[in-house]
Amino acid sequence: MKRIGDVIKEFPIRPPTEATRGEIVVAPRDEVKCPICQDAGYLRNDVPTGHRLFGQVTICVCRERELQDANAESLRKLSNLDVLSHLNFETFDMSVPGVEDAYASALDYAQNPSQRWFFLFGPVGVGKTHLAAAIANYTMSSQKVSTYFDEVPDLLDHLRATFDPNLGTGYDERFQLIRDVGLLVLDDLGTENATPWAREKLYQIINHRYVEQLPTVITSNVDQKKVDDRIMSRIRDHRLTHYVEIDADDYRRPGDPRKMRRSGRRT
Ligand SMILES: [Zn+2]
């Protein structure tokens, strides 16, 4: 194995900047992809002994780009949004009665989620999951916000599992990741059949995000009396939460064919 000092000596010298003022010794070759670093990914600084940058390496722009792409990839994996990428604002079914305001509010929130919560309440089948996923897809792709989307029952399963191959993390790391993620979307709050342990974990996540005012989207279709009081009291804080309710009466008008067509847990 080579010593680190010898490895560094093999890196090309960084082109001179005001800080380093050195000599360019990089000779571009046809077969290399990056003429700056000769594909080494790093550049050593051409500075005299004793200079604060002596012996240090600088990351090359080509490697920096690679790392950014890798970050975007792990962000995408984390999000759970792969299978929901088609649920965006463009594909939302605006013909469902009573959804216009919810759509406008969701789009508004997606464009500026900082320090706010978005709570979407309404019956099954009006597109709550679609709007929540649209917000998540928007913040992740347009605003590069780290985003995590999960149905509450699945989230609790994921927390219970000792290791999540999707995230490549153990419990503590995963709990923190979800608790602190840039935007957390919790779909179907209240449908979980939670053990006291899971209820406590869910409360800890929600309370942490409440205290830190971290952007959070929550959807629910159940009687709010069924939801943990401690959680509901935080959701009801109107200083924090933009509360949107899709009117069930609008949607459930007699003879609406959409009622017959829609099924499944994702709403
Ligand atoms: Zn390079």
Image: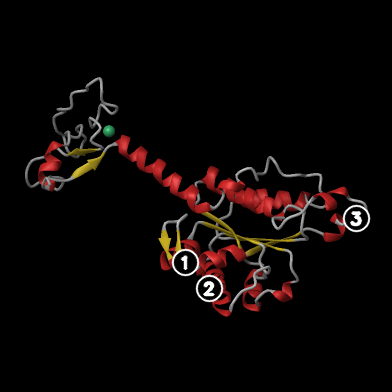
Colouring used for the render: secondary structure
Quadrant location of residue 70? top left
Looking at the image, the residue that sits furthest to the bottom is 196
Vertical placement of residue 251 versus 26, above or below: below
Observer able to see residue 97 = no
Element assignment for label 3: loop
Q: Are marks 1 and 2 in contact (CB under 8 Å)?
A: yes
Disc 3 marks which residue?
Answer: 253
Vertical placement of residue 34 versus 55, above or below: above
Q: Amino acid at mark 3?
A: Arg
Q: Residues within 10 Å of mark 3 (few under 14, many from 20)?
A: few
Q: Are marks 3 and 1 in contact (CB under 8 Å)?
A: no
Disc 2 marks which residue?
Answer: 201
Disc 1 marks which residue?
Answer: 175
Locate residue 120, reporting x and y percent: 70, 60
Q: Amino acid at mark 2?
A: Lys
For the point 50% across and 50% down, which residue is it? 145
For the point 93% across and 55% down, which residue is it? 254
Q: Amino acid at mark 1?
A: Phe
Quadrant location of residue 86? top right
> Which one is nearer the viewer's eye here, 189 or 211?
189
3 or 1: tag closer to the N-terminus: 1
Looking at the image, the residue that sits furthest to the top is 30
1 or 2: tag closer to the N-terminus: 1
Real-space CA distance between mark 3 and mark 2, rounded to the nearest whole angstrom: 39 Å
Locate residue 7, reporting x and y percent: 14, 42
Locate residue 147, reporting x and y percent: 52, 53
